[in-house]
């Protein structure tokens, strides 16, 4: 079938935004224009404890009105350094919109990074009760920076906003916690929120090996003094990441490659469980009494921080309900809303240019309203979410929407999914998980982790004997999911530990084709989409944490045990004529480290301690395995 992107109108809950996004100024931003319209100033701003933070100020020359301040605090450098050298960020995307709107734009190296003084601390814990000037955190540094800027930057209107993507998203959250009276609007985007439960370096306690090693081999190198230089990472001497990470073996071998100078890597190795050290670094725990308006932004296909945006929004809703808190999620890779056109990811097409539409209709509207007092903020509802599959924007008064019903769909015999509960007394599927042959996260050979794997074709995995596959019959009506998917598995292991990966997959019809007259004309090397198994959401869970993330427990080989966990939220419609598939496996390599499948310290164990494990997943009357779906019900 030829798939067109048809609108799906649903009263009260859904609406469709046209793709003819607002046309902002056609003014091209280039170096000549910036030199004629903006000044650049570099300053050192003293914090309350005397440490000075390097700060770049881009200010409009225009004096006909006062201008708002918009700041990004970053550990990734506010380069280029030096008079007359303008950041390439200013020429395109969101930043260019703020240049056209004549914002005062601030970039600041956070404490201990690049040209700022002090010691850098990864995801520095928030100090709720500061008693002395030496009780500093990212919230106090944000407060002190904002205070200085409002007092010393000429021609500002006294209104300040903060935004940032990824790690700068974490610093945006911390800025919101400062509650400086001039801070009116904050947008954490793909914010680092909890590095043990879901962002970047762990998912449900499982270590993200490839990203963790590649990132910290360069970023984590100690810096003896302020510098403009970037740290150099470990150069992998081959092109096949699967082969490299498998060959290197146990985690402690990677520690040897890095040496003992990378403090946070060493801390990771010392804190395998969700202890007080990790909990103090969970940004959600401090989300109390937030006063600025909040715009939480993320991508449903963000390979790095998919967890953060959904869960920061929910934390603010729960802990600070009086906060003006909005959520926007689109079909983007990490930071894709701020660059590119957002019309596709890998082989999947979305039928519209979602990124520029977001920039001008949502983000620019948000900051213009709260910092400049212009625009109609009523266009921003509580949650504005792009639903893939149907490829439409919808908005709702809450997230998840109020008309979601959590509906179990059961794993059944003969690889079936059914809404009817199993009645058999002895029914299970089984596979052998072998750490020497872990399931790859993609079928391609490459070195760097791809962002496209988030919606990749899963047919390569469904053909493996160590991957269980369950699917529905062909859907006779659309099925829309909105919210977290919960895996509730009844399992038995032949060993004392294992990981569990659950994947939610949209199986396209066998005659499926994209209508190239509608979208993405001229795409080269068109993928075969007939029968495509699109990954909608996948998540991993370390089995030892099935009862507690603080106190792990070994599995008992004589028992059927429950492994229950949530996948990050989904916003997707399985269209009529498609099928819903669930895949279950016990490795996802090398994006996540291998479990030795014994109840031992994974961070210090030897290569010889990895062992195969027979895993049974039950679908019988007294041991029912299900996937709990957040189904949107049409009123």
Image (spheres, grey):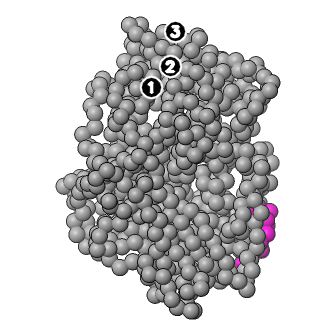
Pinpoint residue 404: horizontal percent, then vertical percent.
42, 60
Badge 2 density bin: few <14, some 14–19, many ≥20, Cα 10 Å = many
User: In the image, which disc is placed on residue 159?
Assistant: 2
Pinpoint residue 150: horizontal percent, then vertical percent.
56, 15
Residue appearing at x 39%, y 77% in the figure: 472
The residue that label 1 is drawn on is 370
Taking the magenta stretch, the answer to whether it contains residue 602 is yes
Pinpoint residue 47: horizontal percent, then vertical percent.
71, 21
Contact between marks 1 and 2 (CB within 8 A): the answer is: yes
User: In the image, which disc is placed on residue 197?
Assistant: none
Residue 36 visible (yes or no): yes
Q: Residue furthest top?
A: 63
Give the side of residue 138 with respect to residue 454, left or right.
right
Taking the magenta stretch, the answer to whether it contains residue 486 is no
From mark 3 to mark 2, how far is it between C-alphas?
A: 13 Å
Where does the N terminus fall, quadrant-wise? bottom left
> What secondary structure is marked by label 1?
helix
Give the side of residue 269 with respect to residue 415, left or right.
right
- Of labels 3 and 1, earlier in sequence is 3
Contact between marks 3 and 1 (CB within 8 A): the answer is: no
- Of labels 1 and 2, earlier in sequence is 2
The residue that label 3 is drawn on is 154
Q: Does residue 301 sit above or below 410 in this rendering?
A: above
Q: Nearer the viewer, mark 3 or mark 2?
A: 2
From mark 3 to mark 1, how far is it between C-alphas?
A: 20 Å
Give the side of residue 499 with respect to residue 634, left or right.
right
Badge 3 density bin: few <14, some 14–19, many ≥20, Cα 10 Å = few
Q: Which residues are magenta?
A: 599-612
The front one of 117 and 388 is: 388
Pinpoint residue 567: horizontal percent, then vertical percent.
54, 61
> What secondary structure is marked by label 2?
strand
- Of labels 3 and 2, earlier in sequence is 3
């Amino acid at each position: 079938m030829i798939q067109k992107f048809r609108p799906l109108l649903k009263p009260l809950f859904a609406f469709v935004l046209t793709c003819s996004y607002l046309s902002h100024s056609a003014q091209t931003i280039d170096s000549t224009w910036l030199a004629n319209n903006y000044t650049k100033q570099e300053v050192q701003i003293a914090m309350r404890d005397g440490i000075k933070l390097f700060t770049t100020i881009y200010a409009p020359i225009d004096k006909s009105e006062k201008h708002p301040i918009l700041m990004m605090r970053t550990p990734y450098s506010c380069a280029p350094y030096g008079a007359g050298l303008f950041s390439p960020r200013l020429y395109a995307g969101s930043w260019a919109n703020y240049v056209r709107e004549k914002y005062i734009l601030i970039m600041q190296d956070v404490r201990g990074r690049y040209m700022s003084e002090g010691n850098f601390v990864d995801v520095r814990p928030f100090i709720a009760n500061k008693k002395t000037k030496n009780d500093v955190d990212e919230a106090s540094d944000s407060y002190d920076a904002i205070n200085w800027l409002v007092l010393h930057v000429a021609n500002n209107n006294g209104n300040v906003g903060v935004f940032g993507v990824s790690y700068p998203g974490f610093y945006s959250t911390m800025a919101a916690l400062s509650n400086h009276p001039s801070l009116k609007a904050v947008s954490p985007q793909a914010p680092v929120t909890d590095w043990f439960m879901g962002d970047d370096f762990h998912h449900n306690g499982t270590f993200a090996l490839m990203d963790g090693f590649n990132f910290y081999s360069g970023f984590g190198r100690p810096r003896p003094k302020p510098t403009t230089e970037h740290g150099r990472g470990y150069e992998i001497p081959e092109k096949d990441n699967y082969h490299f990470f498998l060959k290197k073996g146990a985690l402690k071998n990677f520690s040897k490659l890095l040496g003992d100078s990378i403090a946070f890597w060493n801390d990771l190795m010392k804190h395998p469980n969700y202890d007080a050290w990790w909990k103090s670094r969970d940004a959600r725990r401090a989300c109390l009494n937030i006063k600025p308006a909040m715009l939480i932004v993320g991508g449903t296909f963000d390979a790095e921080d998919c967890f953060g945006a959904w869960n920061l929004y929910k934390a603010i809703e729960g802990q600070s309900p009086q906060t003006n808190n909005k959520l926007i999620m689109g079909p983007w890779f990490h930071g894709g809303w701020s660059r590119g056109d957002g019309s596709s990811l890998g082989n999947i097409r979305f039928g519209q240019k979602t990124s520029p539409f977001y920039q001008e209709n949502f983000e620019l509207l948000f900051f213009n309203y709260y910092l400049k007092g212009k625009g109609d903020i009523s266009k921003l509802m509580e949650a504005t979410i792009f639903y893939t599959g149907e490829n439409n924007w919808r908005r709702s008064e809450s997230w998840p929407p109020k008309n979601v019903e959590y509906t179990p769909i059961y794993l059944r015999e003969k690889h079936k999914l059914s809404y009817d509960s199993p009645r058999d007394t002895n029914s299970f599927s089984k596979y052998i998980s072998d750490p020497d042959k872990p399931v790859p996260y993609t079928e391609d050979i490459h070195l760097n982790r791809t962002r496209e794997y988030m919606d990749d074709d899963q047919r390569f995995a469904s053909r493996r004997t160590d991957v269980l596959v369950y699917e529905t019959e062909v859907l006779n009506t659309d099925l829309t999911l909105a919210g977290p998917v919960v895996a509730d598995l009844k399992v038995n292991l032949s060993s004392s530990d294992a990981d569990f990966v659950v994947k939610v997959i949209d199986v396209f019809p066998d005659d499926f084709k994209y209508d190239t007259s509608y979208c993405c004309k001229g795409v080269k090397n068109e993928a075969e989409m007939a029968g495509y198994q699109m990954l909608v959401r996948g998540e991993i869970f370390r089995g030892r944490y099935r009862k507690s993330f603080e106190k792990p427990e070994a599995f008992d080989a004589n028992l059927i045990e429950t492994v229950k966990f949530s996948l990050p939220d989904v916003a997707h419609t399985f269209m009529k004529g498609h099928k819903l598939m669930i895949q279950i496996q016990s490795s996802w390599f090398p994006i996540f480290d291998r479990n030795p499948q014994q109840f031992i310290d994974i961070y210090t164990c030897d290569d010889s301690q990895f062992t195969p494990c027979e895993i049974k997943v039950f679908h019988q009357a007294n041991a029912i395995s299900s996937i709990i779906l957040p189904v949107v019900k049409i009123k």
